[in-house]
Amino acid sequence: MTTILTDTKLQGIAEKVQHGERLSIEDGLYLYDTPDLLGIAQLANQVNYKKNGDNVYFIQNMYINPTNVCEANCGFCGFKRKPGQEGAYTMDSEALLKYVEERWNDNIREFHIVGGHNHEVPFDYYLDTIRTLKKHYPNVTVKAYTGAEIEFFSRISGLSMKEVLEELIKAGLDTLPGGGAEILTERYRLKMSPDKASTDQWLEAHETAHNLGLKTHATMLYGSIESKEERLIHMDRLRQLQDRTNGYMVFIPLAMQPRSVNAGLKRRTSAYDDMRTLAISRLMLDNFDHIKAYWINIGVQLTQMALTFGSSDIHGTLIEERISHSVGALTSQGITRDELIHLIKSANKVPVERDTFYNVIKTY
């Protein structure tokens, strides 16, 4: 592929990319500064094409939030409730199964489970959630509990994070989602999520999971108080862990949602920032196979654009997403398989339905 750069200063970075050399944080900062957005897109598209060709992956999954009661006080969250607060809930096994049954179809391959850090229930509650789902839906992959939740379970149970993960795996856990990472610097976490796992604890949860044989996911929540350098430090910490374990399957940049759906443009990330961040993620995370464009956060049309900015995955059907929609997400809460296929095909890409671990179910 030929790359046409309007910013000649990008040539050095382009040569690194073309020779498979790792980009530095300084390189990443220049990528955030250059006006040549389409040049960055071309480089990211080249990297993705070498890894994935024209394939774009999606999954039929169901999003489940068993409880919204949470001890943490994060500056970006509209989902949490305090115990006894109006709207607070904690599903028991009966309510959990009813929730799934009402939304079930036979093509669902993954339960994506995250929730509040509910200290009103014991660790066994979280184990029973997985056991219940595995008992009734044994062929569905359970993607459950963020790295921050793993650290929380360790605190309420008195077990080490390794022991927590071992118990979850016995109950039927298959993989960890990527949430709870936010931005992996302590300056950010002390301001935005002071009650949750530290940078080192979140990374430790995932490294421990990798060492126990789990493949996991990684996210970054961008668009608030973090600097561009902190975004790049976040990516660098993930790729360092990936160098050690090769345990991550995909990286998902998540655009921060404002507190209200009526929030103006100044309260949202720009399309330029979204596209640039996706492309830079593809260029920085050379040891990740996939960068995911999360349609819930950036919308379906920007998701189509992202497929030429280095993204190879658009997530899944979700059925009913709650966390982004508890704040200012403007998208629908779910999408059909046919719509996902159309989204990919109309971007001149090849739709590939996958399972959680990127095994191909069907190519369309």
Image (cartoon, helix red, strand yellow):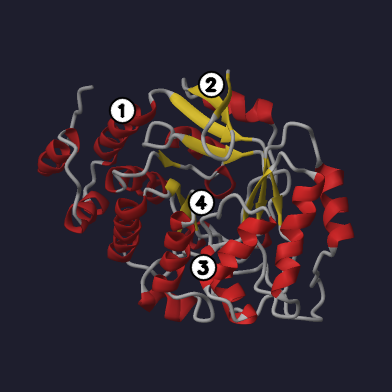
Q: Earlier in the sequence, mark 1 or mark 4?
A: 1
Q: Is residue 88 left or right of residue 205?
A: right
Residue under pointer 4: 214
**Secondary structure of the residue carrying numbered label 2:** helix
Give the number of the mark in front: 1 or 4: 4
Residue under pointer 2: 345
Q: Amino acid at mark 2?
A: Lys
Mark 1 surroundings: few (<14), some (14-19) or many (≥20) residues within 10 A: few
Residue under pointer 3: 162
**Secondary structure of the residue carrying numbered label 3:** helix
- Disc 2/disc 3 C-alpha distance (Å): 42 Å
Q: Is residue 183 left or right of residue 325?
A: left
- Disc 4/disc 2 C-alpha distance (Å): 32 Å
Q: Residue at x 37, y 36 (%)?
A: 309
Give the position of the N terminus as an image quadrant: top left
- Disc 1/disc 3 C-alpha distance (Å): 36 Å
Q: Is residue 76 visible?
A: no
For residue 50, the mark is 1
Q: Earlier in the sequence, mark 4 or mark 3?
A: 3
Residue 142: give x, y in percent of width and height: 66, 49
